[in-house]
Image (cartoon, grey):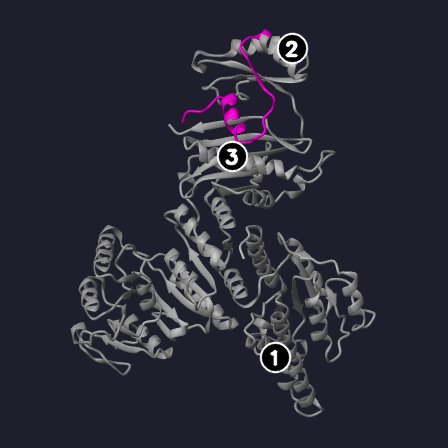
Amino acid sequence: MKPGGFNALFDPKGIIVAGASTHPGKFGFVALHNLLSSGYTGRVFATNLEGESVLGIDTVADIDELPAGEADLVFVCTPAGANLELLRKCAAKGVRAAFITSAGYGEAGPEGMEAQKELVRVAEELDLLLAGPNGQGVISTPSSMCAQIVAPFPPRGRIGIASQSGNFVSSFNNYARHYGVGVSRAVSAGNAAMVTVADYLEFYADDDETDVGLAYVEGITDGRDFFDRMRAVAERMPLVVVKGGASDVGARAAASHTGSLATDDRVFAGACRQAGIVRAPTIEEAYEAAATFATQPLPNGPNVCVVSTAGGWGVVTADAISRTKGLRLLPLPDDLRTELDQHLPPRWSRNNPIDLAGGETKDTIPTILEIAARHPAVDSVILLGMGIQGNQGRMEKTGPFYPEHGLARIVDYHERQDRRFTEAAAAISYDVGKPILTATELSMADPSNPAVTGCRDTGKLCYASANRAVTALAHLWQYARHRQRRGLA
Amino acid sequence: MPTLSEAESKRLLAGHGVPVLDERAANDPDEAAGAADAIGYPVVLKLCGDAIAHKTERGLVRLSLTDADAVRGAAAELLAAATTEDGDVSLLVAPMVRGSRELIAGLANDPQFGMTVMLGVGGVLAEAVADVSFRLVPITRVDAEDMIDDLATQRLLGPFRGEPAVDRERLVDVLVGLSDAAVEHPSVASADVNPLIIVDGVPVAVDALVELTA
């Protein structure tokens, strides 16, 4: 696969939207709308059979009317029957890549499959990179490009997405919008006639804008080839994969005992472990794992320290850690306990989880967090119980007594403190080079809570539960351990 | 698909470091008794042949034989039970080993991923429990260690009912040995080491069956 084609697909200097429509219900309208709305700064051209003006763009009826050398990507919303000629004309104008949204190809029976083969043949002849067909589009935040027939456009970030399902691209991007941990590139592979999910992931592995791969796959046509290539990708960057679709167990010869236990999924699971691929069972877990890889350093070991402002959270988090394969709740080292004693009232838990038992004063949380994170036996920290005071502040702010009775001042203080704590978590994590994950359901219940916005504004994901933070951290440690044990830097 | 006899299967796998019992072939009851004397009692006696795959179902395995007379008697019965379809047959004398833990290991060809190595918890509940781990051939020692870690029933691998913990290095030898066997013999279509009994913490292949591609 030629890198030039990928560069044209993800960072085009100009784009032609073929089949732009004046009807806001048509893909040809939505594609142009999304492209023009996302801040893309390259040149935008569009074709329309009548040559009408669409969203302020003067369209042309024929590609021949466009200047040469101004666009290197064509985004195709025309019917399948028009596309061969379209590709030829675009290539003549200097286009290097085509994203085909059109249906009626491989997904549409034997005739569609023939049309798809012809499409690939023509693209190869023209030296065009062909994405799709039957895909939803491509996103590239460094180019502010949302060439997609669906929402949303995610914030900029370091996650590269490739999916066999266009809707899961949208799902991942919706999570990115919600949590604020963003995306570099995202592409729906559609029928993947020429370019497959594996090809996109290989491009991401070498892409300066991308630190983490995130993929959804269903059918894998050559497992061994996929395995070999993804192992190479996972050596260069963390790769999170969700696999959907049950296997055709019936097709398997169950001649031996071993064979009858070898369901497709167990073999896939083993292949992922062997290749260092992070496999997630659900879309949200996959996103959260990828977002954690994108925003936290890798832990050097399994030992987790839990810091909590109250008891119950710490207890269930300890349980969650014990359920993982690999993470360990660090028994509190004596020297760490002694040091913490100097900063906490006698009723604190004196063990891990470090339960502050409501004993915190103005600077307690950042102080304790830093002492814990700095201790050489601690590999990672989970911070719980943030945002409580800000949540009270929200109730007071919207209640009947605000701003009287001293409420204005105290609410302001708590908002600043909450925000300061999660900002401190990010700063300490950066300073000591260890993951610090903040978890509170306020991440979902009230994303405007100052602890949550503090987390978000420092680029970190605020986990919706301790359980989810533990799950994400377990993925990080498994990947880090995989690398350590194989001597990968 | 053609299968190797138990003795040939074990010879092939033992050549790659899969530990097998000190077994001896015998052609008649007296030879079997002599072999049993050399191994030490109790012994197990089996009827083996390239065409015999399901010995237990046909009653071709005799356990816990404690003296030479018992071996002679069992050997005569087994030879008499052979049918013309069984082709050439011989007797196999093996020490009777005991261990309360059984694992399964093997090689299986996946239509998508090619040859795989498998490790699982064995015994009569193996398929219901389905505690298994796979890797693609070839595997490294680190991969094999990961496979052992993958098993959900980790408690089975620690000290168990008065027996010591499973020697993980020896278990790694079994898995890497299977992988090496698959690499070196592309004609191997599958292999079943079942049971792989843990004897005093050490895995031993008590039965093995290697299938070849037709």
Look at label 1 and name its amino acid: Pro
> Which residue has dot 2 on it?
B70
Calculate the distance from the C-alpha at mark 2 to the C-alpha at mark 1: 83 Å
Calculate the distance from the C-alpha at mark 3 to the C-alpha at mark 1: 57 Å
Looking at the picture, does residue B17 appear above or below residue A356? Answer: above
- Disc marking residue B162: none
Q: In this view, does A420 lie to the left or right of B192?
A: right
The chain letter under disc 1 is A
The chain letter under disc 2 is B
Q: Position of residue A26 (x, y in %)?
A: 29, 72
Q: Which residue is drawn at 69% across and 75% down?
A: A366
Q: Does the magenta stretch include residue B46?
A: no
**Crowding at label 2, few (<14), some or many (≥20) Cα neighbours within 10 Å?**
some
> Which residue has dot 1 on it?
A450
**Crowding at label 1, few (<14), some or many (≥20) Cα neighbours within 10 Å?**
many
Residue A1 in sight: yes
Q: Where is residue A489 in the image (x, y as percent from the top left)?
A: 54, 57
Q: Label 2, secondary structure: give it.
A: helix
Q: Residue at x 61, y 67 (%)?
A: A433
In the picture as drawn, the residue positioned furthest to the bottom comes out as A404
Q: Position of residue A412 (x, y in %)?
A: 65, 86
Boundaries of the magenta span: B1-30
On-image quarter of the N terminus of chain B = top left
Of labels 2 and 3, earlier in sequence is 2
- Disc marking residue B178: 3
